[in-house]
Amino acid sequence: MILGIVQARTGSTRLPGKVLMDLCGAPMLLRQLQRLDHCSTLDALVVATSDLARDDPLAGLLEAEGRDVFRGSEADVLDRYYRCAAARGADVVVRITGDCPLICPEVVDAVANAYLADGACDYASNIEPETYPDGLDTEVFPFRILELMWREATGDEREHVTPYVRLRPEVFRHCLVSHDPDLSWMRWTVDEPRDLEFVRRVYTCLHREGEVFGLEAILALLRKKPELLTVNQGVVRDVALKRLRAKGAGQ
């Protein structure tokens, strides 16, 4: 069973409560889940949030919408993922973060299908190297690798879930999905108010209830309205992982 796990919480530091903020008349996270519903490779989809009281409203909203919710440690996200996947009987996990309301089903499916086609892959992603816009990040790995990370990873590796495998390509077989041309300079994720403003403008132009707009539609819009790209220009991508890489290189 291929299980999509979306990690989400309300306690983000730069934009607290962002997953519940309005996006075309619905909470941002629900808009993201609606897009993921169109993935052909996912057998099930669950939101993994924290067990803290401040995430009760998030869990309640999701359950009221008929969404599957798992609750676990806020700080040890790797433990949350492992227990969620084990509880749902996952064979393969597709990891997506809850701050990506422009996630494209065809991109998620491309990474999942690359993992399945390889046959011997320990970890598949479209972020090594980064060639897709920030906000389309998708990682796929078997439950056995998740269990290994859960047993072996320490420190910051547990907060960010996959660095144990990502930073050891000499040990684990990676399957990488890239985009040509390189679009990694584009920022489609939501960490700051200007990110949310960018996403809202895209949704205002493209969103139609019950439908899903994909990667090519977003790119066509940005070619038509390049001024949108200046809304959140200059925000650095993957700061936390860059710190982890630098720490590893210094040891």
Image: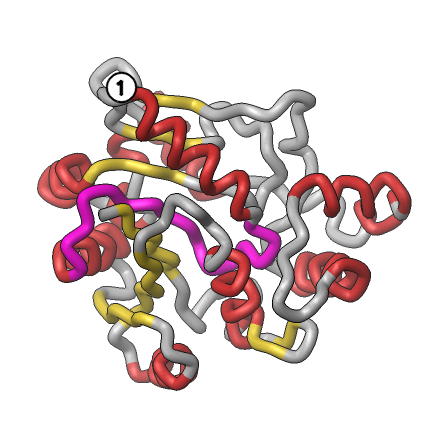
Describe residue 237's horizontal placement relative to residue 120 as left or right: right
Q: Residue at x 40, y 64 (%)?
A: 8
Looking at the rendering, the stretch of residues picked out in magenta corresponds to 88-103
Identify the residue position indicated by label 1 in the image: 173
Q: Position of residue 50 (x, y in %)?
A: 29, 70
Q: Is residue 191 above or below residue 56?
A: above
Query: Within the image, what quadrant is residue 244 found in?
Result: top left
User: Quick check: is 100 in the magenta stretch?
Assistant: yes
Asked whether 141 or 164 is in front, the reply is 141
Q: Residue at x 14, y 54 (%)?
A: 89
Residue 19 at least partly seen? yes
Asked whether 46 or 189 is in front, the reply is 46
Q: Position of residue 109 (x, y in %)?
A: 45, 39
Q: How many marks?
A: 1
Query: Within the image, what quadrant is residue 31 found in?
Result: bottom right
Describe residue 222's horizontal placement relative to residue 251 as left or right: right
Residue 156 at least partly seen? no
Q: What amino acid is labelled 1 in the image? A: Arg
Describe residue 107's horizontal placement relative to residue 96 as left or right: right
Q: Residue at x 13, y 37 (%)?
A: 144
Q: Residue at x 53, y 39 (%)?
A: 107
Q: Is residue 150 above or below residue 141?
A: below
Residue closest to the far top: 170
| SS of the residue under disc 1 | loop
Q: Position of residue 43 (x, y in %)?
A: 31, 52
Asked whether 204 or 52 is in front, the reply is 204
